[in-house]
Image (cartoon, coloured by chain):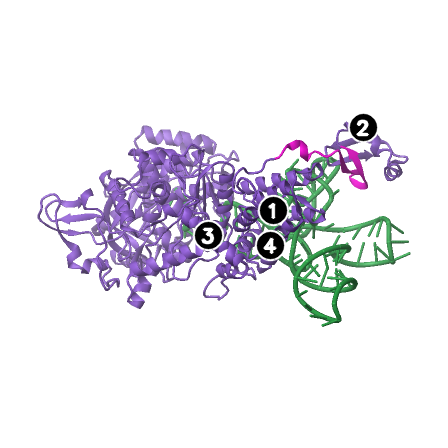
Chain colours: A purple, B green
RNA sequence: GCCGAAGUGGUGGAAUGGCAGACGCGAAGGACUCAAAAUCCUUUAUGGGCAACCAUGUGUGGGUUCAAGUCCCACCUUCGGCACCA
């Protein structure tokens, strides 16, 4: 009888929905396990290959953990605010809210048709007023603790989307969403003071179990560096600071370079004799994006600030000062000391402007190229031409010079971080309104808690305005309000929050999704604790992960959450490529719709097929060829019903069965779903050789199969009227059953295989050696030779080294 | 340029330093069939040989080791990430 997946899968899915089979009860006595998969953005085109493999993989983990007796929380929701919906709304005239509802319903239907065991009772949506009420409330906590502030900043501006972008969103100098080159624009923005958490975000990584490469990417983004602040003076008496990680090169300074935006440049306008040239250079630099300034322009540019010179802090000599756009205003102090002999960028600049060079660290050929810290650190290089510091090693000099500077109040040791504050404003419609009111008398006032949420007004037009203000700014009924403090006339903030806001705390809401008093109760958070397993895409490894950790750490500091880090482990699914191995994209027309396979083969086959394509965590091409063999496997397992006999596990079946239990259990734990399926195939191949299968043997196979193909496993279990549940009591094995009495070992002479032979597994090393020497081929190879060494590797080989 | 990951048959991919290619796909041959599909059986890394067998083989070149796909060094290629970070 063929397996009718259409009817059977529907039957079980309906049952799960009606009975809330996979609802996780908070407070249950069983040990908890929290599996989190990144919630999708509900686009109009439905689930894609970026969603389904991870949901299936984590479903397998969840189902297995439940069978092992855990109280598993495996929730899903929707990260629904976002530009595509808004743009679709503008194009079609439909309301973003309606579009979102429709898309979410479509996603839910698709996810349910794959048989993912989500707890649908906990389904959330970031656009739900009951959700973003708390997103807004959490923002107010940042504000109340001085971590949200408004500042006029040169922000990345997309002239097409008419939206400010965070540094992270304008990767490569183009708008992440539309690809338009990003320009600079000054704008008042809400900022979150993420830089205040640099060190905590760095330290906290030690309290997690993330993959090491994920930790590395977090560390790189935070970008801690130890160095020295050097206090310097200009001939005008003005002081400035520079940051350096190479204070040992201080005696090699031949000029200083300021960022074009450096405050002193404007302040000393009147003292600069070539101001026209300088102004011209600044204007050009402002036109360039950070991208162009820092990468496209390989050749160094700059202008000397004539009329100004700096005084070397130690030698007190006069040193020229430049502005150059290779110096960034927002890193370090916006000015650098230039040592052309020991920094490649300074070297290029000095060559171009014909500036002097002083070698201060020996060992390189500084006439040809800069001898940089990567070249000299750790090589015991000594200082030269460095006055009282000459002769010290670099390591000694770092210490001595810093001490000297500190004693003479010329500088101090410090730590800087690359990570900047987070631009938290967007001038759009489809986002959480920032819950702030500006009163002419009281200044910025928070919206009182009782008035939350500040809801988005129901309007007909969402177009961004040409002046860069939010669309909300044109809606008078939204803007005009009264000041909560003085009752006078006031105006609402019209910026909305970035897409990242809702996703920065959603894992907390899952723990207590219907709470209307708090964002989540302390009891629920204490019960569920850290997310045990967090699966997501590689593209979110730095940004989203840092944002969520930042929020969480702040919440911990103000006593809102009971533990320091949100996620215990973070794993990453491999990128799915098109069938030809190229990148999948709509523009190339090579996308694959995973739902097509659910229709053709059913959920169970499609689940197996997607997991069988290759290593879960590696990048790999989509392969249609994986569906057929998985369909075959299920059909075979289904057909075993025709050769069942009531009976226990036979002794001679135990080995193969135990091996499969071991492999499948371990492979699910280590995310090796492809080899877990191989193991099931191997067991099926073995079952094919048996004349009949005992019911207890079959039940083990069904239990192992169940996380991968739940519908069919449940159906067979029910049809056969087996006792208990296929979803409980995960099979275990006795390690003794994996020990065989004999095993084939390889016998080598000088590491070349000369024989394969069955040996007793209980034999001692000497017995193995003695027996090996009796084998004809071995004797032949040993003839007239002297054995100098014998290597025995348990259960593997015997190797005779001869002369 | 820097950082990270990877490179294995015709193909997707397996291999705690210990028999390279598990499990599949594809292909070839066979069984069943009037025929086909489905299913089942056999073969399938490459070169040589009728064969037993021999030689070669995990991107390239070195090295460590009794033994290297795996460890070390250098390089090449591909894919990700970062962007003059002082």
Residue A312 location, x and y as percent? 33, 39
Determine the secondary structure under disc 2: helix
Q: Residues within 10 Å of mark 4 (few under 14, many from 20)?
A: many
Residue at numbered disc 4: A630
User: Residue A13 — which label?
Assistant: 3
Q: Does the magenta run of residues contain A715?
A: no
Are the residues at dot 2 and dot 1 in contact (C-beta closer than 8 Å)?
Answer: no
Determine if marks 3 and 1 fall on one subunit. Answer: yes
Residue A696 found in image quarter: top right
Residue A551 vertical placement versus A413 (above, below): below
Q: Is residue B25 left or right of residue A796?
A: left
User: Residue A767 — which label?
Assistant: 2
Mark 2–mark 1 distance (CA, rounded to whole Å):
36 Å
Q: Residues within 10 Å of mark 3 (few under 14, many from 20)?
A: some
Residue A250 location, x and y as percent? 39, 38
Which of pointers 2 and 1 indicates the residue nearer the eye? 1
Determine if marks 2 and 1 fall on one subunit. Answer: yes
Q: Using the image as rendered, state which of residue A603 and residue A440 is in the foreground.
A: A603
Q: Residues within 10 Å of mark 2 (few under 14, many from 20)?
A: few
Determine if marks 2 and 4 fall on one subunit. Answer: yes
* Chain of the residue under label 1: A
């Amino acid at each position: 009888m063929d397996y009718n997946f259409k009817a059977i899968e529907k039957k079980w899915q309906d049952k799960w929905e009606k009975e809330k089979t996979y609802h996780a009860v908070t407070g249950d006595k069983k040990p908890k396990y929290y599996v989190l998969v990144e919630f999708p953005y509900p686009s109009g085109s439905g689930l894609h290959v970026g969603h389904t493999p991870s949901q299936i993989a984590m479903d397998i983990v969840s189902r297995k953990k439940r069978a092992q007796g855990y109280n598993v929380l495996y929730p899903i929701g929707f990260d629904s605010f976002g530009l595509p919906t808004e743009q679709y709304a503008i194009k079609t005239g439909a309301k973003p809210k309606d579009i979102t509802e429709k898309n979410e319903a479509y996603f839910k239907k698709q996810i349910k048709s794959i048989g993912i065991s989500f707890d649908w009772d906990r389904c959330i949506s970031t656009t739900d007023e009951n959700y973003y009420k708390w997103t807004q409330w959490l923002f107010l906590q940042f504000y109340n603790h001085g971590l949200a502030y408004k500042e006029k900043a040169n922000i990345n501006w997309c002239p097409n989307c008419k939206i400010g972008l965070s540094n992270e969103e304008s990767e490569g100098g183009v708008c992440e969403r539309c690809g338009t080159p990003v320009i600079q624009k000054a704008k008042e923005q809400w900022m979150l003071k993420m830089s205040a958490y640099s060190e905590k975000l760095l330290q906290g990584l030690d309290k997690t179990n993330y993959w090491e490469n994920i930790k590395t990417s977090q560390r790189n983004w935070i970008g801690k560096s130890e160095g020295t602040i050097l206090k310097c003076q200009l001939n005008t008496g003005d002081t400035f600071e520079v940051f350096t990680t190479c204070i040992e090169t201080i005696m090699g300074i031949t000029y200083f370079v300021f960022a074009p935006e450096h405050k002193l440049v404007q302040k000393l306008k009147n003292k600069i004799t070539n101001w026209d040239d300088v102004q011209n250079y600044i204007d050009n630099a402002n036109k360039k994006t950070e991208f162009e300034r820092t990468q496209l322009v390989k050749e160094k540019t700059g202008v000397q600030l004539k009329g100004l010179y700096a005084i070397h802090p130690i030698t007190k000599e006069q040193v020229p000062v430049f502005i150059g756009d290779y110096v960034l205003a927002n890193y370090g102090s916006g000015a650098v000391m230039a040592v052309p002999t020991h920094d490649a960028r300074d070297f290029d600049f000095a060559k171009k402007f014909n500036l002097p060079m002083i070698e201060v660290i020996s060992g390189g050929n500084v006439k040809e190229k800069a001898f940089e810290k990567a070249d000299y650190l750790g090589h015991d290089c000594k200082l030269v031409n460095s006055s009282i510091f000459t002769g010290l090693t670099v390591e000694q000099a770092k210490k001595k010079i810093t001490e000297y500077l500190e004693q003479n109040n010329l500088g101090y040791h410090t730590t800087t971080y690359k990570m900047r504050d987070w631009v938290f404003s967007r001038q759009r419609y489809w986002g959480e309104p920032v819950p702030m009111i500006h009163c002419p008398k009281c200044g910025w006032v928070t919206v009182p808690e009782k008035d939350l949420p500040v809801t988005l007004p129901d309007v007909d037009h969402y177009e961004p305005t040409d002046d860069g203000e939010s669309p909300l700014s044109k809606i008078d009924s939204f803007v005009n309000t009264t000041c909560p403090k003085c009752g006078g006339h006031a105006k609402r903030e019209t910026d909305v929050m970035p897409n990242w806001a809702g996703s920065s705390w959603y894992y907390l809401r899952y723990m207590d999704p219907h709470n209307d008093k708090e964002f989540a109760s302390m009891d629920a958070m204490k019960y569920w604790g850290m997310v045990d397993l967090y699966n997501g895409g590689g593209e979110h490894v730095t940004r989203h992960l840092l944002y969520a950790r930042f929020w969480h750490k702040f919440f911990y500091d103000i006593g809102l959450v009971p533990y320091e880090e949100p996620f215990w482990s973070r794993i990453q699914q491999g990128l799915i490529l098109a069938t030809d191995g190229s990148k999948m994209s709509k523009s190339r027309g090579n996308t694959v719709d995973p739902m097509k396979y659910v229709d053709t083969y059913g959920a169970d086959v499609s689940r197996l097929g997607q997991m069988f394509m290759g290593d879960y965590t590696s990048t790999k091409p989509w392969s249609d060829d994986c569906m057929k063999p998985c369909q075959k496997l299920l059909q075979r397992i289904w057909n075993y019903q025709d050769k069942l006999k009531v009976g226990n596990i036979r002794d001679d079946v135990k080995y193969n069965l135990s091996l499969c239990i071991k492999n499948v259990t371990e492979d699910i734990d280590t995310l090796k779903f492809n080899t877990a399926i191989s193991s099931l195939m191997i067991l099926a191949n073995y079952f094919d050789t048996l004349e009949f299968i005992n019911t207890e043997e079959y039940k083990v196979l069904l239990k192992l199969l169940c996380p991968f193909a739940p519908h069919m496993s449940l159906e067979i279990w029910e049809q056969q009227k087996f006792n208990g549940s296929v979803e409980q009591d995960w099979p275990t094995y006795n390690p003794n059953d994996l020990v065989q009495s004999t095993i084939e070992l390889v016998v080598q002479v000088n590491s070349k295989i000369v024989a394969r032979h069955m040996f007793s597994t209980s034999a001692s090393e000497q017995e193995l050696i003695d027996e090996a020497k009796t084998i004809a081929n071995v004797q032949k190879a040993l003839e007239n030779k002297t054995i100098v060494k014998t290597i025995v590797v348990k259960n593997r080989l015997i190797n005779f080294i001869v002369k």
